[in-house]
């Protein structure tokens, strides 16, 4: 279940309650999906509070936002586990990774590869590989200016961007082939924390790099 598709319990006319009445299966799929950052209580509580503020339903007042978030976490993990059982390729692509790489893999599962139903496992592996290559490039600052470009993208985007979004911005900046001094100039010239997506951040950074 992508985070953006979460529905508060009162919206589903008992569907969520029916799902939550079934205990989570204590198996590897449930344990794996419990590591998906999208289903962390903190993230889900933030989503619940935002939805309640935007579209408050008095029928939901019986439960606190914390209780609603806990129910949503359980729903998300159960749906993810069912998805993993039906798609062992994706499960295998995520399960064998380190914690750092698994974070990238979950970003891919939740966002970048969400529509790749038939080949999602391969898509996840490709995203993890691309992220690792980008991290090596930044660590080595090769090509020159790569490290400053990566930081610029991080600064332009809203805080804690998903890896797939950050990589989209860096890829867009690399495509300009700007001189290192131009990249350094843009690092302090762009507005900070204004872009919500990698595409938006990429346009901002690319425009600055092209303007020199």
Image (cartoon, rainbow, N blue to C red):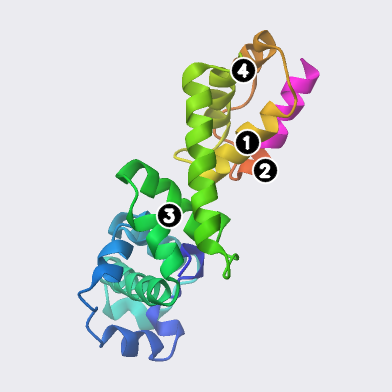
Q: Residue at x 33, y 86 (%)?
A: 19
x%, y% of residue 126? 54, 49
Report if residue 88 lies within the magenta region: no
Residue closer to the observer: 102 or 14: 102
Residue wearing tag 4: 143
Q: Which of marks 1 and 4 is nearer the N terminus?
A: 4
Element marked by disc 2: helix
Residue wearing tag 2: 199
Measured Cα–Cα span from mark 3 to mark 2? 20 Å
Q: Earlier in the sequence, mark 1 or mark 3?
A: 3
Q: Residue at x 47, y 52 (%)?
A: 107
Q: Which residue is drawn at 58% across and 44% down?
A: 196
Measured Cα–Cα span from mark 1 to mark 2? 6 Å
Measured Cα–Cα span from mark 4 to mark 3? 28 Å
Within 10 Å of the Cα at label 2, are there few (<14), some (14-19), or many (20+) other Cα atoms?
A: some
Q: Earlier in the sequence, mark 3 or mark 2?
A: 3
Residue wearing tag 1: 169
Residue closer to the observer: 204 or 191: 204
Q: Earlier in the sequence, mark 4 or mark 3?
A: 3
Element marked by disc 1: helix
Image quarter in which the C terminus is found: top right
Q: Which mark is residue 106?
A: 3
x%, y% of residue 53? 45, 64
């Amino acid at each position: 279940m992508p985070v953006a598709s979460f529905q508060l319990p009162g919206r589903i006319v008992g569907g969520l309650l029916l799902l939550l009445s079934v205990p989570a299966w204590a198996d590897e799929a449930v344990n794996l999906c419990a590591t998906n950052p999208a289903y962390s209580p903190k993230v889900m509580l933030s989503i619940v509070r935002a939805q309640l503020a935007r579209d408050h339903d008095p029928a939901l007042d019986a439960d606190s936002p914390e209780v609603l978030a806990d129910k949503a976490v359980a729903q998300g993990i159960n749906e993810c586990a069912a998805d993993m059982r039906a798609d062992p390729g994706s499960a295998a692509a995520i399960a064998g990774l380190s914690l750092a790489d698994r974070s990238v893999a979950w970003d891919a599962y939740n966002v970048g590869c969400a529509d790749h139903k038939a080949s999602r496992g391969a898509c996840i592996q490709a995203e993890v590989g691309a992220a690792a290559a980008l991290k090596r490039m930044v660590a080595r600052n090769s090509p020159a200016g790569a490290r400053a470009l990566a930081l610029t993208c991080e600064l332009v985007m809203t805080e804690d961007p998903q890896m797939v979004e950050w990589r989209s911005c860096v890829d867009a900046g690399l495509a300009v082939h700007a001189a290192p001094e131009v990249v350094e100039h843009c690092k302090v010239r762009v507005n900070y924390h204004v872009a919500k997506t990698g595409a938006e951040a990429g346009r901002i950074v690319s425009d600055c790099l092209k303007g020199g």
